């Protein structure tokens, strides 16, 4: 399998690191496994014999990789010209027009290349189009990392709940707001201070409004609704209210009654993101940057998953999608 990685930022670099750690195992599954291209916003390195990920891991800089030249050309041109069995799309999320990820994914799928992505934008804007493109091209489009990071949401439903109907999904889908609300709850800090702390720790998106106004969580609600409940939802279908209005008084009132305030995303008849009172002993009630997702199923009842919604742990989701793709490829050939 020839692999391309589009986006060599936080996730791209951590993916390369964990590919070196799992290298022997990957080679056992597919002796021809190699990463032949890695791109950032300025260009890419390409080597049809495979990039030396061990060397690249040391410098983490595409331009100082010594075994292939850095080519100052857009990744979009690369995926038009070269063929890859699998493309990782790890460029920044853009929910306005999905670019550059949307074009990367469209081009890859239409050329018969499997796609694994952590990028919410293209899925929020064009889920149904991309899924039907993948079907027509007989390719996989896997996106475990887009919702709740390392928490195996889609693979759980795909593999382990095949006989169930998921009736409702609810969860803490944004780690930044959970961090802010947890700091306010346990340390008594104000919203402004907790937000500043989150920014200093690098937990917020470049535009923090995206987190605190509930837009990031709403994007995940749209992906869950479409991918798990078979809807045709768009972002404007989600009723969104964020956490700007939550003050110390609201937190302390909730505390007195044995509740915490959490920003909850819900997929039921309506799609919603809003601050809710959650009993302290409820399985969804997790703290810090953790995410939690609860499925209410017609046979299994309630199933709740808890884990890291972002950070290097997210590579777990990317690798799981890669192993799924490798196995599917092996069955095909
Ligand atoms: N970080 C997490 O924990 C996490 C978790 C779940 C999902 N995600 C999603 O995963 C994606 C990647 O996240 P990240 O944290 O790795 O982002 P990041 O650190 O900002 O890295 C983004 C990378 O994409 C590159 N890029 C931008 N435009 C490009 C283009 N036209 N062609 C090729 N590469 C391009 C950037 O290039 P330069 O290096 O030249 O700027 C950078 O290397 C995002 O969509 C994010 O929302 C992230």
Image (cartoon, rainbow, N blue to C red):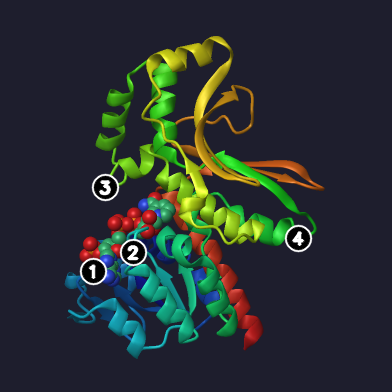
Please rate how many residues cluster around mark 2, counting C-alpha atoms within 10 Å: few if below 14, some from 14 to 19, many from 20. many
Q: Is residue 9 visible?
A: no
- Queried on whether the Cβ of the residue with tag 2 lies below 8 angstroms from ligand 1, the answer reads yes
Q: Is residue 236 above or below residue 175?
A: below
Residue 109's spot in the image, x, y percent? 48, 80
Residue corresponding to mark 2: 91
Ligand 1 positioned in quadrant: bottom left
Q: Is there a contact, CB below 8 Å, between mark 3 and mark 1?
A: no
Badge 4 element: loop
- Measured in 3D between alpha carbons, the distance from the residue under mark 3 to the one under mark 1, in whole angstroms, is 17 Å
Q: Earlier in the sequence, mark 3 or mark 1?
A: 1
Q: Earlier in the sequence, mark 1 or mark 2?
A: 1
Badge 3 element: loop
Please tell me which residue is depicted at 55% across the width and 69% down the height of the picture. 128
Q: Is residue 90 above or below residue 67?
A: above
Residue corresponding to mark 1: 41
Q: Residue furthest top?
A: 256
Residue 244's spot in the image, x, y percent? 36, 29
28 or 78, nearer to the observer: 78
Q: Is residue 239 above or below residue 138?
A: above
Residue corresponding to mark 3: 206
Please tell me which residue is depicted at 62% across the width and 59% down the height of the picture. 231
Q: Earlier in the sequence, mark 3 or mark 4?
A: 4
- Measured in 3D between alpha carbons, the distance from the residue under mark 4 to the one under mark 2, in whole angstroms, is 31 Å
Q: Is residue 170 visible?
A: yes
- In the displayed structure image, the side of residue 50 where residue 154 appears, left or right: right
Please tell me which residue is depicted at 59% across the width and 69% down the height of the picture. 324
């Amino acid at each position: 399998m020839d692999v391309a990685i589009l986006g060599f930022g936080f996730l791209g670099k951590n993916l390369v690191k964990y590919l070196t750690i799992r290298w022997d195992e990957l080679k056992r599954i597919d002796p021809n496994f190699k990463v032949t291209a890695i791109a950032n916003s300025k260009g890419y390195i390409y080597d049809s014999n495979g990039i030396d990920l061990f060397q690249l891991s040391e410098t983490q800089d595409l331009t100082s990789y010594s075994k292939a030249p850095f080519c100052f050309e857009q990744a979009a041109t690369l995926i038009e010209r070269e063929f890859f069995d699998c493309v990782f799309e790890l460029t920044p999320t853009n929910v306005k027009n999905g670019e550059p990820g949307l074009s990367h994914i469209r081009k890859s799928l239409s050329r018969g290349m499997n796609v694994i992505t952590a990028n919410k934008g293209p899925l929020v804007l064009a889920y149904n189009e991309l899924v039907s493109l993948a079907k027509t091209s007989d390719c996989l489009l896997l996106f475990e990392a887009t919702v709740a990071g390392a928490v195996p949401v889609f693979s759980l439903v795909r593999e382990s709940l095949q006989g169930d109907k998921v009736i409702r999904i609810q969860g803490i889908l944004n780690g930044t707001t959970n961090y802010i609300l947890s700091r306010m709850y346990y340390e008594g800090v104000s919203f402004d201070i907790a937000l500043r702390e989150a920014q200093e720790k690098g937990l917020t998106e470049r535009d923090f409004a995206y987190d605190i106004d509930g837009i990031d969580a709403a994007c995940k609600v749209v992906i869950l609704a479409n991918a798990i409940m078979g809807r045709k939802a768009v972002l404007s279908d989600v009723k969104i209210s964020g956490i700007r209005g939550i003050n110390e008084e609201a937190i302390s009132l909730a505390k007195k009654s044995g509740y915490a305030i959490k920003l909850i995303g819900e997929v039921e008849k309506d799609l919603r993101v809003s601050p809710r009172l959650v009993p302290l002993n409820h399985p969804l009630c997790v703290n810090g940057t953790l995410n939690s997702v609860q499925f209410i199923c017609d046979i299994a009842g309630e199933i709740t998953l808890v884990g890291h919604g972002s950070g290097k742990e997210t590579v777990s989701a990317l690798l799981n999608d890669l192993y799924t793709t490798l196995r599917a490829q092996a069955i095909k050939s």
